Amino acid sequence: MSWLDDTDDDEPEFDESDVRVRPNPKANRPRTKRRPAHEDAVLARVLGVDRGRYTVLAEEDGPDEHEVTATRARELRRQPIVTGDIARIVGDTSGIEGSLARIVGITERTTLLRRSADDTDQVERVVVANADQMLIVVAAADPEPRERLVDRYLVAALDAGIQPLLVVTKTDLADPTAFLQHFDGIDLRVFTSARGDMPVDEIGAALVGHSTVFVGHSGVGKSTLVNALVPDAQRATGHVNEVTGRGRHTSSSTVSLRYRGPDGAGWVIDTPGVRSFGLGHVDPAHILDAFTDLAEVAKDCPRGCTHLPDAPDCAIPEAVADGRLGAGAAGRLDSLQRLLTTFTDAAHGR
């Protein structure tokens, strides 16, 4: 007898019918990671969020366009859902009072505007999704305009692939010419506004067909501008503290509002006023791109030039000193080098 025949005839044989399955003591269905496809989901634009409830717009631009209140599905608890997102909703999408739909997903975003607490903080805060324009609002005075804050907005916008615009308000209080010189060499469309002379039609025309996020320091008149463009917005307005020179936060949440003008419609996304805008999430390679004229001159720099103050043979300081880049070039170079130094120090743990 060969070893192939060396079996115990008394050993029992088993098959699938002999497997005993322990009963489910809770008598509930077993858990599964498979999620329903929700093929019947309706697309809806997220207009705002308040204490875990999302206001979304379903059937956008259709005859049955209506707002719906929704909550997020459990599986999306780690997924940020922000104003501007295009969500997929299921459940009661009628929008009638007391109804509640459920967000089960969001479509792929075209852009994502982010900020961080400071330049060394890698934890990003999502501001808005799917915006294609940024309207930066500053005041000529009360509070004083801050060139470097605007520079930060420009860097964040271009890093996100968003086209920036600039509005200078309160020009009846101060001449903004010196301030605007800082941006002479930058590809940036500028509007100016004064009390009783707000360019609503010109700004509105720039909003048609776009989703525009409004950003700015507290107290610069951003909410006043939003209310002029969207009369039923009813965004709260405030004042500037005479002692500190700081504006009071009036808009406490980000919200999308429909702009309707004589030339067409668009979206205005109003955001709370901020006093700082961290760029910890930004690719350092995109910082120079925000300074259009300096980036053009930098093409003549040696390979690997850092453009820092001690960079040898950097072409930018020479062009600034020669006056080739205009009166505001020195300030732009200083702002660029400050930002680059911050990111360099962070990279080296300094």
Image (cartoon, rainbow, N blue to C red):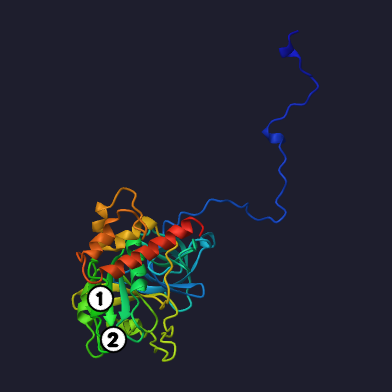
| Residue 271, picture quadrant | bottom left
Q: CA distance from mark 1 to mark 2?
A: 14 Å
> Which kind of residue does numbered mark 2 sit on?
Lys
Task: Give the total of numbered labels.
Answer: 2
Work out whether 236 lies above or below 61.
Answer: below
Name the residue furthest top: 1
Report x, y in % for residue 109. 37, 59
Identify the mark at residue 344; answer none if there is no mark: none
Instruction: Provide the secondary structure element on which disc 1 rests.
Output: helix
Residue depicted at 40% across the width and 70% down the height:
83
In this picture, residue 53 sits left or right of residue 183: right
Q: Which residue is mark 1?
A: 180
**Which residue is outermost to the right?**
10
Residue at 19% from the left image edge and 64% from the top image edge? 324
Q: Nearer the viewer, residue 173 or 34?
A: 173
Q: Position of residue 94 (x, y in %)?
A: 41, 72
Q: Nearer the viewer, residue 309 or 198?
A: 309
Residue at x 25%, y 89% (from the top left corner): 172
Crowdedness near tag 1: few (<14), some (14–19) or many (≥20) residues, C-alpha within 10 Å: some
Which residue is the site of mark 2?
170
Q: Quadrant of residue 169?
A: bottom left
Label 2 neighbourhood size at 10 Å, few (<14), some (14-19), many (20+)?
A: many
